[in-house]
Amino acid sequence: MGQRLVALAHEDPELTIGAAWDHAEHPQQGTDAGVLAGIGEIGIPLSPSLTTQVDVVVDFSVAAAVAPLVQACQQRKIPVVVATTGLSEADEQLVRTVAETIPVVWAPSMSLAVNLLMKLTQLAAETLQNQTSGVDFEIIERHHRFKEDSPSGTALKFGQIIAEATGIDRQTHGREGRPGARPRNEIGYHAVRVGDNPGEHTIVMGMLGETLELRVAASNRDCYASGALSAAKFLAQQPPGLYDMSDVLGL
């Protein structure tokens, strides 16, 4: 994701890359970020710290890096886009606290299509919740074999949207054995990890006699990088506060 952020930001006339920030033990520290991204030298070496003054930081890393990164941004009064998922409850609370003093965009997915589907999911769940036959909600997500958190943060967000629309308060992660008839008040999650799949989510709403499926799939990671860069442009103009992609996209 860092490579695609660098490549797409370099192509965008509204953006200038000020720094490329990564873990101190990254084996390619000091290498030009443009070379790493496959676009040639851009004069920005990979660095273990942020020493340049920038307008916005985009974090697309791993959960363990989020806390020190957002704290560093808070200390320097730099807005930050948090696109990393799999955060602990303590890290999530830290992001909320930091947003009291600096602008923060925090979202489980930076994709335009994913965030539009979230709105459609909300509408569908609110519309179908009073069906006399009941509605069964299942969320199926697919990602690459290297993804560390499961279910994905995006899948959990879809579940949160359904729960808020319907009042369902139970979650089930996969099924095996003989669990019995499906309860009416549960949201089911199923995580698939295969190959290099960049991300795919299907929301299944099953009723007696018919089924509605809402699906979104990424063909590469550029949709996430483009969304994160749009969030950075949005955030540079905002006062302190916690924002999400609905704010960025005007949804």
Image (tube, rainbow, N blue to C red):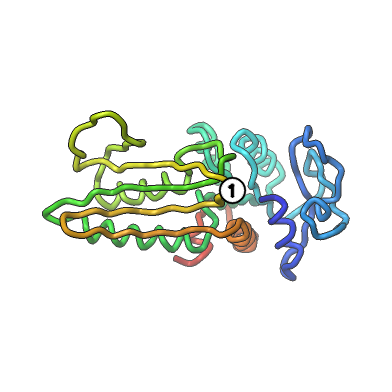
- Which amino acid, by three-letter code, is at mark 1? Asp
Farthest-out residue, left: 132
Question: In this rendering, is residue 30 above or below 214?
Answer: above
Residue 237 visible somewhere in the drawing: no
Residue at (69% x, 56% y) in the render = 5
Residue 134 against residue 123 in the figure, above or below: above
**Extreme-bottom residue of the structure:** 13
Q: Percent position (x, y) of residue 84?
A: 58, 44
Which is more toward the observer, 199 or 238?
A: 199
Query: Tag 1: Cα neighbours inside 10 Å, few (<14), some, or many (≥20)?
Result: few
Return the x and y of residue 20 as percentages of the image width and height.
Answer: 77, 48
215 over 169 or under it: above or below: below
Please name the residue shown 18% across and 37% down the image.
Answer: 181
Q: Position of residue 64 (x, y in %)?
A: 62, 33
Task: Tell me the residue that label 1 is attached to.
Answer: 196
Left or right: where does residue 66 sit relative to residue 245?
Answer: right
